[in-house]
Image: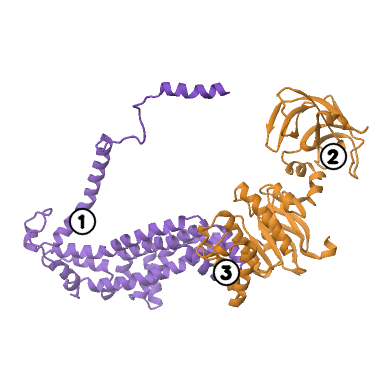
Chain colours: A purple, B orange
Amino acid sequence: MSMANTAAPAIAAASQDIAGPYGPKPRRMFSRRNIFLYGTLFVIAAYYLLPLYVMVVTSLKGMPEIRLGNIFSPPLEITFEPWVKAWSTACTGLNCDGLSRGFWNSVRITVPSVLLSIAIASVNGYALANWRFKGADTFFIILIVGAFIPYQVMIYPIVIILREIGLYGSLSGLVIVHSIFGMPILTLLFRNYFSSMPEELFRAARVDGAGFWGIFLRIMLPMSLPIFVVAIILQVTGIWNDFLFGVVYTRPDTYPMTVQLNNIVNSVQGVKEYNVNMAATILTGLVPLIVYFISGKLFVRGIAAGAVKG
Amino acid sequence: MTAANGTSVSIQDLSLNFGAVTVLETLNLDVANGEFIVLLGPSGCGKSTLLNCIAGLLDVSEGRIFIKGKNVTWEEPKDRGIGMVFQSYALYPQMTVEKNLSFGLRVAGTPKDEIAKRIARAAEILQIEPLLQRKPAALSGGQRQRVAIGRALVRDVDVFLFDEPLSNLDAKLRAELRVEIKLLHRKLQNTMIYVTHDQIEAMTLADRIAVMKGGVIQQLDAPQTIYNRPVNRFVAGFLGSPAMNFIDGQVSAGTAFKTGDVSIPLDRYAFDAAGNGGGPCVFGIRPEHVAFGEAANTMPFATDAAVEIVEPMGSDTLVWTKLGGHNFSFRVEAEKTLRNGEPIRIGFDPARASLFDSQSGNRM
């Protein structure tokens, strides 16, 4: 035994290479692999950013400069005139007060729709996940099937329903439509999230005497920030970007921003004001963009907070 | 003991089915006031399900449950006078320890000073006073489990239900908390029903153990009785580590057990009321009941064998050999050094053995 112990290091020492590798393996900055990887990433990023670049550049040019035809060249003379015009004076149909009207319409559609649909869907998901009432599975299947029915099929019946209850053409009608159509996917989202929560937590709360709403409001809600952020992102971008329901269920003076944008860009009278069109498009896309930037950070933080064991 | 103290929890003809699957089958169980009952069994035997039924977290398919003489079969968990401790602790992660403890009381609308008083008492008993303002994420496993016990404690309940409370802890902590739970029971004198698959927890904690399998209580008795006189082969094999030796063979009407060329006299063995019908059976003897060397010769039965494998465990050593062609293990002191293949003499007293019918597995 003792012989083996003393012999082992001697053998190891003999085979040791003093100048051999030690510590972390060095990596070359300009290896073939890195050049290929970053090269590809750069090309793809440029490909996706180019349209945005053209839009921004064009929106900052005056019409004479645009007529020169160099769409990639930066503006010689920066002007914010097109942005102002797109926001406040561009004409859509009868009104000439720009996109601002559509912006506020969209806000008045999006905010209540998002709040209403998330409020209802979170309770739906919670009930389906934790309170296995009779017929819960059937209810859930029906709800999910709803997500697969094409919107076009339902447009006309909904027009009739809204007309009968006197909400056709009003913003509240559109809010109801958005809330209903958000229900299947949001309920699925919340149900899956609440199902993934430890069931013993729910049982502990029941033993502690909390009821349906007590458990939901005091135990489940404080733990579900991440899924609420996901739901808000989904709904805000989905409803803000919606065109079909906006054009069908509202009147010209209650058109959402997307419909107004279309009317500005596709107007057939007069000169095509490319700079105004570009500015209007960026303005319309700004809200989802901001939501992504803000909530993206919150989203990551929410997930990280939820990941702590306990 | 039931008659003297009165019954705390009484389960009558309880059945539970999930669709076509029967989880519990007409189960009856009476727990005396202040008794510590352990429900022991392998996973899937229905022990946790039974506990959830008692807690009111699962609706029963048939039968009744009484707690403190009150029929609580249809009552909500909070109205049953129970507190429950879960395997995963189930602490509310967004609340501090203090809020965790007080949650049930706040839901019930208990006055503030009363809540403070009860939390102070529970924190003192469990020694978690320095932790009260912390969130569960900042606690260790043992501390979390203490808080979970505290949550049951503050509610001033009659019956404590433990659902494998120590399974998520490491071995050392488990042993520590096991002792603490035992001390807690002695201090509080509450009825406790404790679910576990760990036989050591069951043996050390229980006043009585209910060994369960397939939704049926196999044996309900004091730990020593269950250990020494298991009613069937399942119970015998489930309790004890290292496990009991089982040897297949025949019992002849002439009171001897035969396997291979070995014959073990059974005149000292106390047969059950059903008696000795003869026929194929299983002979069981625990490794610590086997004597070795000189001591073997003083036993009613002794034979020669050879060492096959030696497993040192620190406190003692388990030696494997063959008896009548079957694997056979026994315990010797750790100081003994045995070589593989060494001839040895082993013996035991058949009075300490258990005989099971090969067909039914029941004790003979």
Bin the neighbour count of mark 1 within 10 Å (Cα to Cα): few under 14, some 14-19, many 20 and up.
Answer: few
Front of the two marks 2 and 1: 2
Number of numbered discs present? 3
Q: Amino acid at mark 3?
A: Phe
Within 10 Å of the Cα at label 3, are there few (<14), some (14-19), or many (20+) other Cα atoms?
many
Mark sitting on residue B352:
2
Residue A52 is labelled as 1
Q: Position of residue A140 (x, y in %)?
A: 51, 60
Label drawn at residue B154: none
Residue B306: percent from left, percent from top: 76, 24
Chain-order first, disc 3 or disc 2: 3
Q: Tell me the distance, in whole angstroms, between the alpha carbons under discs 3 and 2.
A: 52 Å
Identity of the residue drawn at 27% across and 40% down: A37
* Subunit under mark 2: B
| Secondary structure of residue under mark 2 | helix
Q: Amino acid at mark 1?
A: Leu
**Can residue A122 be seen in the rendering of this structure?**
yes
Q: Would you say A80 lies left or right of B352 here?
A: left
Q: Amino acid at mark 2?
A: Arg
Name the residue that disc number 3 marks: B103
Q: Is residue B264 visible?
A: no
Q: Residue A299: where, in percent of width, then height?
A: 38, 59
Q: SS for tag 3?
A: helix
At x 60% / y 48%, what residue is drawn? B170
